[in-house]
Image: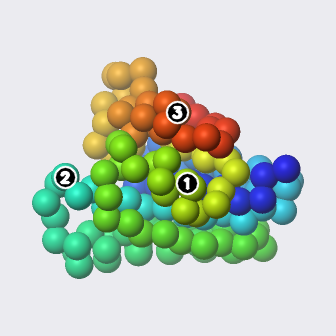
Amino acid sequence: MFKRILVPTDGSKYAKKAENIAIDIAKQMNSTIVGLHIIDENLGLSFDTSESEANKILNLFRKQVEDESLTYESVIIFADPAHDMKTISEKSKVDLIVIAAHGNSESANHLLGTVADNTLKSVKVPVLLIK
């Protein structure tokens, strides 16, 4: 049913929960997992430094996925995470997004983080929101 599962991750404890659930789904459906890290273009960080951190995060996820004998792809994008998920999901040709309700930069006191909220509103594929 779900051939390609997109999992945006920033390495936070919330994202780790989403990663684990995505792996469980992928094992049941023999899906490919697409790990995504978005370097926020609005933060003005050095791309080289940010890319290095993104690679560390995605490589940890890759190991976890490959330990389960699943296929893994990774994507690092310099974009606006709150507004570009629709385009990213379409270009990645995914049919499910598993996303944490909050990331590193968002307060758990809010019901829903900005990225998750905008993802729910904008994408055309099913979204599994992890709290």
Mark 1 Cα shell of 10 Å, populated few (<14), some (14-19), many (≥20) = many
Q: Disc 1 marks which residue?
A: 89
User: Disc 1 residue type?
Assistant: Ser
Quick one: 129 or 68, which is closer to the camera? 129
Residue 102, image quadrant: top left
Q: Is residue 101 visible?
A: no
User: Disc 3 residue type?
Assistant: Leu
Residue 120 numbered mark, or none = 3
Q: Is residue 20 above or below residue 45?
A: above
Residue appearing at x 31%, y 74% in the figure: 51
**Which comes before the other along the chain, label 1 or label 3?**
1
User: Disc 2 residue type?
Assistant: Asn
Residue 39, image quadrant: bottom left
Q: Disc 2 marks which residue?
A: 42
Label 1 or label 2, whichever lies nearer to me, is 1
Residue appearing at x 67%, y 39% in the figure: 126
